[in-house]
Amino acid sequence: MGFRVAALTCSLLVIASSLSAAAEIPAAPKASSYASAKDLVAALDDYIERIEEVLADPGEFADLQSRMVKDAETISVLALVLGLHDEDNVYKAAAGELIKSSQAVAQAADYKAAKAAFEQLKAAKSAKGAAVTGWVRVASLKALMEQVPLVNSRLNRNMRRFERQADGIAQDAAVLAAIAQGSMANLEETIQPSNSEKWFAFCQQMRDAAAVLNKAAVAKDEAGAKDAEAALAKSCDDCHAVFHPEGLESAK
Ligand code: HEC
């Protein structure tokens, strides 16, 4: 009897520890170490402006809705990082409301719903709600992973005009770092939800490469930025080799 209770307790412990191991996101470094609040605030404002453009013309909504969804989900992640940021920023107290309302924009079924949700999103910029408290899932992996190549291509284009585009490069690198950090919470949506160690490590690799690129761009260090760009590209390939094998070629 004692043995059976012990065996049962033991197997319950194994189940409990494997469940918690899969979900536990590693402690994040201070956000300022990979993306300044200033860059993230500027990026969040840009994405809000882009959604405003999409919603300016109801006739174009069908064509542009998927872009709006990606941008809204990106706002959710940017707001989360700003809410947890070690640097004070204008969206820290608004983060919870920004996340909620950007999620509503992403989920809007039609133009009217999107427009109404977007008004809430704009109002949320000055909200003073409860602070966000941890690295929870706020966006879909699919939307984030569709946004990453778009941001990355613009960044690569801007690298060819480094002097003039250093600010834009810094901002895009900050966005990629924020998405990489935020994506850790999307483990369950990957093709290998049990491979948490690798998923977190690849997210970290992308985040840290983007952080180096951000700093090099801010310092106007073109050679350093080129090295970081290569390290960032490697992080894409390394992760895809395990988690997106069918996309190895398309990401190039
Ligand atoms: C931590 C892992 C990881 C990293 C790092 C990563 N990706 Fe991905 N990527 C994925 C996964 C997983 C998918 C598939 C997402 C899905 O469809 O659910 C994906 C999908 C894609 C796609 C296909 C998107 C589509 O339209 O379906 C492209 C393109 C892409 N990634 C480019 C990049 C680029 C460029 C980088 C580096 C700047 C990068 N990825 C970094 C995991 C990663």
Image (spheres, rainbow, N blue to C red):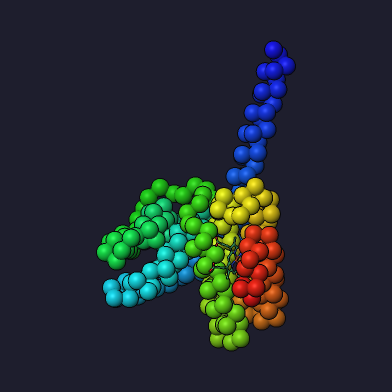
Query: Which sits in the foreground, 91 or 122?
Result: 122
Rendered image quadrant of residue 238: bottom right
Q: Position of residue 84 (x, y in %)?
A: 51, 54
235 shown above or below 194: below
Q: Residue at x 66, y 69 (%)?
A: 248
Q: Quadrant of ligand 1?
A: bottom right
Describe residue 238's horizontal placement relative to residue 116 as left or right: right
Which residue is at the far top?
1
Task: Pinpoint residue 82: horizontal percent, then vertical percent.
Answer: 49, 59
Which sits in the foreground, 96 or 244? Answer: 244
Whether residue 196 sits left or right of residue 79 in the image: it is: right
Count of number-bearing discs: 0
Expressed as whole percent of the image width and height from the top left, the position of residue 171 reads 53, 72
Residue at position x 52%, y 67% from top? 146
Quarter of the figure that contains the C terminus: bottom right
Task: Check the image and name the residue furthest to the right.
Answer: 3
Q: Residue at x 64, y 28 (%)?
A: 12
Q: Position of residue 45 (x, y in %)?
A: 41, 69
Residue 129 falls left or right of residue 189: left
Residue 89 visible in the snapshot: no
